Image: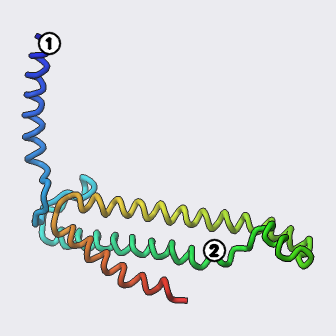
Amino acid sequence: MNVQLAKEAWVRLDSYFGSALSLSFQMYFFFSDKVVLLFDFWNVHSPAGMVLSVLVIMLLAVLYEAVKVGRAKLLQSTMPAMAPSLSQETLEEPERASMNTRVDQLASTPQKLFLWHSTQTLLHVIQVVLGYLVMLAVMSYNAWIFLGVIVGSAIGYYVAYPLLNAR
């Protein structure tokens, strides 16, 4: 008896939620100027609103690429400038290094390392947040938004990556 009631309840819930989900969320790409992006208040319902939304999503994709290159540039420029560890210095030049230099390096190297690591961490968090926002925008399955992400990514890559090799 309980099994039969559970089955009937499940069929009712499945039919109710199944039809509700199929009406409100499409699982394929479609071209439309009506979509809700990321938040309830970002409700697009006109062609002008869609153009503006595509431009914002393109900007997010460009910014994602810029942050990615910025992290790589920071890593590229900072790591060679970091002082070697005291053990390496002691092994290489035990008599050249004065006591004052070693004390200064002890004080400044951990601070520089902490600042560098904190900056890298902040940039990483920004990159992850931007990446998830762009991914969730694509998951709206709106083809215009998807094309905006692709074009924004291409523009960001085209503009930002030459800066990586600039000295």
- Residue 164 numbered tag: none
Amino acid bearing label 2? Met
Q: Position of residue 129 (x, y in %)?
A: 40, 60
Residue named by callout 2: 79
Who is closer to the viewer here, 122 or 75? 75
The residue that appears at 53% across and 62% down in the rendered structure is 122
Helix, strand or loop for disc 2: loop
Amino acid bearing label 1? Asn
Who comes first in sequence, dot 1 or dot 2?
Answer: 1
The residue that appears at 12% across and 70% down in the rendered structure is 47
Who is closer to the viewer here, 84 or 114? 84
Q: Is 15 on the left-hand or right-hand side of 123? A: left
Q: How is the image coloured?
A: rainbow
Distance CA(mark 1)–CA(mark 2): 67 Å
The residue that appears at 82% across and 75% down in the rendered structure is 92
Q: Position of residue 13 (x, y in %)?
A: 12, 30
**The N terminus lies in quadrant:** top left
The image quarter containing residue 10 is top left
- Residue 2 numbered tag: 1
Residue furthest out toward the top: 1
156 relative to 26, above or below: below
Bin the neighbour count of mark 1 within 10 Å (Cα to Cα): few under 14, some 14-19, many 20 and up.
few
143 relative to 17, above or below: below
